[in-house]
Amino acid sequence: MAPSTDLDTLPAFATLQALSHQVPDLTDPALLTPDRLQSLRSHSAGFDLFYATQRVDESILAALQALADQGGVIEQFLAMKKGAVMNRIEGWPSENRQVLHTACRDVFGAPHAPEATGQTEAELKKLADFLDDLDQGRLTNEQGQPFTDMIQVGIGGSDLGPRALYLALAAYSRQGRQIHFIANVDPDDGLAVLKGLDLSRTLVNVVSKSGTTLETLTNEELVKAAFIQAGLDPARHFLAVTGQGSPMDDPAKYLRSFYIYDYIGGRYSATSMVGGVMLGFALGAENFREILHGARDMDRAAEERESRRNVPLLLALLGIWNRNFLHRETLAILPYSQGLCRFTAHLQQCDMESNGKSCNRQGKPLFYQTGPVVWGEPGTNGQHAFYQLMHQGTAVIPAEFIGFRANQYDGDILVKKTTSQEKLTANLLAQSLALALGRQHDNPNRFFAGNRPNSLLMADRLTPYSMGALLALYEAKIVFQGFLWNINSFDQEGVQLGKILASRLLDHMAGQQEDAQYDGSGTDALGWALMQIAGLTKS
Amino acid sequence: MAPSTDLDTLPAFATLQALSHQVPDLTDPALLTPDRLQSLRSHSAGFDLFYATQRVDESILAALQALADQGGVIEQFLAMKKGAVMNRIEGWPSENRQVLHTACRDVFGAPHAPEATGQTEAELKKLADFLDDLDQGRLTNEQGQPFTDMIQVGIGGSDLGPRALYLALAAYSRQGRQIHFIANVDPDDGLAVLKGLDLSRTLVNVVSKSGTTLETLTNEELVKAAFIQAGLDPARHFLAVTGQGSPMDDPAKYLRSFYIYDYIGGRYSATSMVGGVMLGFALGAENFREILHGARDMDRAAEERESRRNVPLLLALLGIWNRNFLHRETLAILPYSQGLCRFTAHLQQCDMESNGKSCNRQGKPLFYQTGPVVWGEPGTNGQHAFYQLMHQGTAVIPAEFIGFRANQYDGDILVKKTTSQEKLTANLLAQSLALALGRQHDNPNRFFAGNRPNSLLMADRLTPYSMGALLALYEAKIVFQGFLWNINSFDQEGVQLGKILASRLLDHMAGQQEDAQYDGSGTDALGWALMQIAGLTKS
């Protein structure tokens, strides 16, 4: 594995800085031509990337490739997939773990990390048996009826990725099977879901790697109370996805348990059992395997050293260009597919939790920017919302568009001689070009400065396979960027402080009756004061 | 009305620039004390604002007040409410309209704009009659059964605000009434909604002010085709909310029509019939009136000149401080209430479409930043997603937290001696303090720089009244900022370019068979080339 060094120490960094003083002007009609559109494109595992509307030229692309080479990005990626301990900070206490989410889908021959993939195979077998038991009627509710509904109880990585994938693929759902999600510790989240569900035919999939996540355990209790009130035995309805040996790994309490290993980070866990149990129930085992297949094919495609033949790497490098050389603070991810309505929220998590870091892998502070704010909503909806600012605001927002040539459901209609799907994709292409080209106009309020960098990912259709590939594409992009920034993209120390403070506040609230004269100091006392001022203490 | 002048020409601008060189340090234990928490708070129409965790002091607050005074913010707000033509660019072709969304709820005595409020009263009467006809069984489906479902077909302003309010208040739904939404021109959006609905008992509320919105008219046809296929007469199921005299204002095609006037911008229209028809059906006329009542009370509270007694104004000024003096490009809006799961998406629209502008109200370019990127997801979910970057990333992200003292549904439970609602609010307060205070730590990966500015809005419970007040709070905040930036917050010229380009691409696609040799030039030819390269033309 190449030594990990800071981005600004790589020789290509200075080259790119020099190049950033004269950036290609996308509004110049001589620049953005059909030839450029034809030439600046790439392809990996079913996805085309069109990036003529990024502010790059051949010199910049060559320097970005040099950056990737000098940073040893592909070497690090291969090392990661083979089980190197990438989740660490040298010389400091840290998680010290392997990073092997790719092993979860490396089940189509010649795995990079045979031991981890073996553990995946064992879990996949347990899942297949479970799904088969449901299908064959060996596993039913108390009345011998099949289960129709599943509630996924989890938060963060145990919620966003699985939820995004389910919504993306709901068109492929098995008839008569419905999924519901509870994540927020806000009791209204769980209570609204429980209202109107037939619990007697409902499975509950509780997902927590550590088995100690406050929100998830609390919501498990909330759901359990509803089952008990309905005269149902939770142990006949509840499933667990957790770490082997965690407090949740208890056959007396759960119908079945599935394991997730500590080499799989929560935000990278959608293709593990964290997503697999629910997706298998909803879509069937074969469709879940298709998701894995797409992800694995993209994982392999991402091993290519030549960035122009490696879509995840190219997207990572274009992101670094926009972030560190053009100084853009945010990234809009804009899928033109209603199925991807929560995919951006998942990427917001995966990207910002991975790369929202300020110290490097040696524990030294960094003097360049790391992960951007990732946000977005599906088009065409976004066009009627925030695109105004993207076109005419004072901030420049790089965008990544995602589109498909065909839609999912039958029943599209012709209105004014075009289908809805054609209207969707025409809008997608029009936005990509309009952001880049801008428009001259006498009326200053109708003038568009253009030069808004963007790229376009396109596949044939949103299917289990392409969804898996798209997920893996972004996972690889995010870790490539982390390697270049020389940060640990696999820990999340930044979530600890708020958690600790909340937990101390709750301790005080729990003991409030006995301990009304709380005499703590510093942060704790401040929290307690705010709680009183905000009117949140019991009267 | 005060003359509209650029922000950087106001005398207080220079004062604030000078003050920005020495900003209060929130990590200093002597600064952020219980006294400061107690002192930096404000209240309007049921909402408390706690802003001790913003990087302000008495001098900065005084200069911000001077900025508001010098900018004539309250004078402009009052002029707007009385019917001044605020939607215009002096000396250039522009919409030249009044801005009277506040008149939609000024129905509780002594209205500022009696004529517009009179039109509102007329629509409210029509709505009451319609709802009464449903309740009394005078209006039923073909079989004499009551309607149980409503599909709202609209996009942008006709979708996001109404949808956010419905989701926020679903706990108050009338039994047996369900709402569904179709917005995206992606056929999968509509087809997924239609799947599994009993159309015979479904009303369809088609919302388009102009009566010409491409997405909405297309989706209306999609839904209509499903009704016809089911042997149902659309004219007995479809309602229209549109401008008087628009192409949709046609009693032959709709069961009932409700009007929206051109003095109400789409993104400010949730309290007009755009939201009213659907919300009245779902929640009942009384609950819709409560929404209006809350909004009107906040509209009145926002007339206060003293910013420390005017929450919307104070929030606007704190936003200007963060944007123009501390140079923060984004704003996270983080509701700790699952009901508000789409409220941030609505505000993203309302704020970014209103204030994503680069020229002033005289058509001159601006040399300071305007609207930020607004984004966010509900807590506690966000804590397990992007808060890592907020705490430890290289970008500083101002945050606006929103919380409630009580939840909506019955059935909260005690786990470890605290309720879920207590866990939720403890997390909320902990995050606010943790972002501000940071934490010293030897391990650089466990160090938190702090000084992340944030504020906290708090009300007793999310009800129709408080939802109305919260909506109006943000609407007022957004227009106050627009006044200070001297921009027209009420037009959206930035959405036109993409629309024009998409429409030309569709014209070519529609005529493709006859006109395969499209020989256009410039942007059109480029769009056509991209369409071919992306594999999107018919084969």
Image (cartoon, coloured by chain):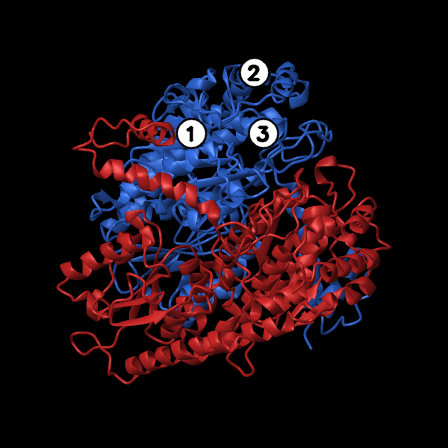
Chain colours: A red, B blue
Q: Nearer the viewer, mark 3 or mark 2?
A: 2
Tell if the residue under mark 3 belongs to the same chain as the one under mark 1. yes
The foreground one among B276 and A248 is: A248
* Residue at screen point 78% across, 59% down: A61
Residue corresponding to mark 2: B63
- Which chain hosts label 3? B
**How far separated are the C-alphas under marks 3 and 2?**
18 Å
The foreground one among B490 and B349 is: B349
Classify 10 Å Cα crowding around label 2: few (below 14), some (14-19), many (20 and above): some
Image coordinates of residue B299 in percent, x first then y, are: 42, 26
Ranked by sequence position, the earlier of labels 3 and 2 is 2
- Mark 2 residue element: helix
Q: Is residue B395 above or below residue A459?
A: above
Ranked by sequence position, the earlier of labels 2 and 1 is 2
**How far separated are the C-alphas under marks 3 and 1?**
24 Å
Classify 10 Å Cα crowding around label 3: few (below 14), some (14-19), many (20 and above): many
Residue corresponding to mark 3: B482
Image coordinates of residue A46 in percent, x first then y, are: 62, 74
- A57 relative position to B225: left or right: right
- Which chain hosts label 2? B
Q: Quadrant of residue B429?
A: top left
**How far separated are the C-alphas under marks 2 and 1?**
36 Å
Q: Quadrant of the C terminus of chain A?
A: top left
Q: Is residue B400 visible?
A: yes
Quick one: which residue is furthest to the front in this view?
Answer: A91
Q: Quadrant of the N terminus of chain A?
A: bottom right
Classify 10 Å Cα crowding around label 1: few (below 14), some (14-19), many (20 and above): many
- B401 relative position to A444: left or right: left
Residue corresponding to mark 1: B117
